[in-house]
Amino acid sequence: MPTIPKRPHYHGHRKRLRERLMKDPRGLADYEIIELVLAYVLPRRDTKPLAKELLARYASVAGVFQASGEELREFPGLGEGAGSFWTLLREVRARFSEAPLVRKDVFSSPEAVAELAMARFGHLRTEEFWVALVDNKNRLLAWEKISAGTVDQTTVYIREVLACALKHQASGMILVHNHPGGDPKPSAQDVDLTRRLARSGLELNIRVLDHLVVTDREYYSFQHMQLI
């Protein structure tokens, strides 16, 4: 008589974990949150050990989900599926943060733009330079990438920034770039570029409202520090 294969032990555990999630999401431990996410990538594996290993390496839930797809693909026990899924999660976060662009929200503080930037490229290992363009009521018109570079610099041409602003008929712009090293403090070159852009923008009646330097979890505002 053929034997009926037993279901893996983690199936019952996973079911109970999902029930706990629905009743009290905050009651789950950090590794349990990661474990459940991994279950969608690796449905036929016990994901608890992997979740604990990821948490040990990256120290927090935020650290785990800020890991790049490349890192996840190379992590023992994971692979292409996990890397793709993590990239998808990051893109969902970025698009959720970009909702103000769709609604044409009014930006009254740098936090909203900083959130856009941290979600979109704060985690990257190379520098990117973006610009948020607004109308005369500070409503967001466009959110554009100007350039991408290396781990510690990106080349920015003033004429390209101003051409982008003119294309969208913007009356103001917020400059944004990331520091992959984790320190948002601007360099002397950042300060010089900001001043030159501000001077050039005035000639075209385009205001430089702020320059934000972001990492994956914090930012520096030129306006707050009275550098603009």
Image (tube, rainbow, N blue to C red):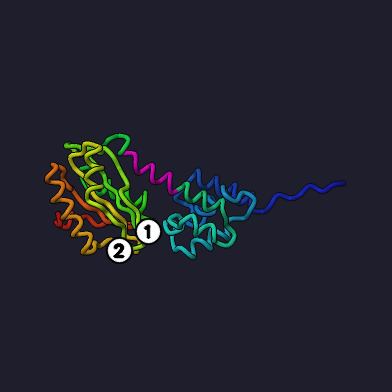
Identify the residue at image location x=23%, y=37%.
Answer: 139
Q: In the visual, does 153 lie left or right of 34?
A: left
Using the image, tell me which numbered label, if any, was put on residue 217: none
Q: Position of residue 30 (x, y in %)?
A: 47, 56
Q: What residue span does the magenta drawing correspond to?
A: 90-100
SS type, badge 2? loop
Q: In the visual, does 94 lie left or right of 83?
A: left
Main SS of residues in magenta: helix
In the figure, residue 180 lies in which quadrant?
A: bottom left
| Location of mark 1 (residue) | 126
SS type, badge 1? loop
The reply to whether the magenta stretch includes residue 162 is no
Using the image, tell me which numbered label, if any, was put on residue 183: 2
Q: CA distance from mark 2 to mark 1?
A: 14 Å
Q: Position of residue 68 (x, y in %)?
A: 46, 56
Q: In the visual, does 140 lie left or right of 32?
A: left
Q: Residue furthest top?
A: 103
Identify the residue at image location x=28%, y=61%.
Answer: 184
Q: Position of residue 178 (x, y in %)?
A: 31, 56
Q: Position of residue 177 (x, y in %)?
A: 29, 54
The amino acid pointed to by label 1 is Thr
- When the figure is inspected, residue 194 is found, relative to residue 94, above or below; the finding is below
- When the figure is inspected, residue 170 is found, relative to residue 174, above or below; the finding is above
The amino acid pointed to by label 2 is Asp
Q: Assign the C terminus to one quadrant of the image.
A: bottom left
| Mark with earlier residue (2, 1) | 1
Label 1 environment density (alpha carbons within 10 Å; few <14, some 14–19, many ≥20)? some
Q: In the visual, does 91 lie left or right of 100?
A: right
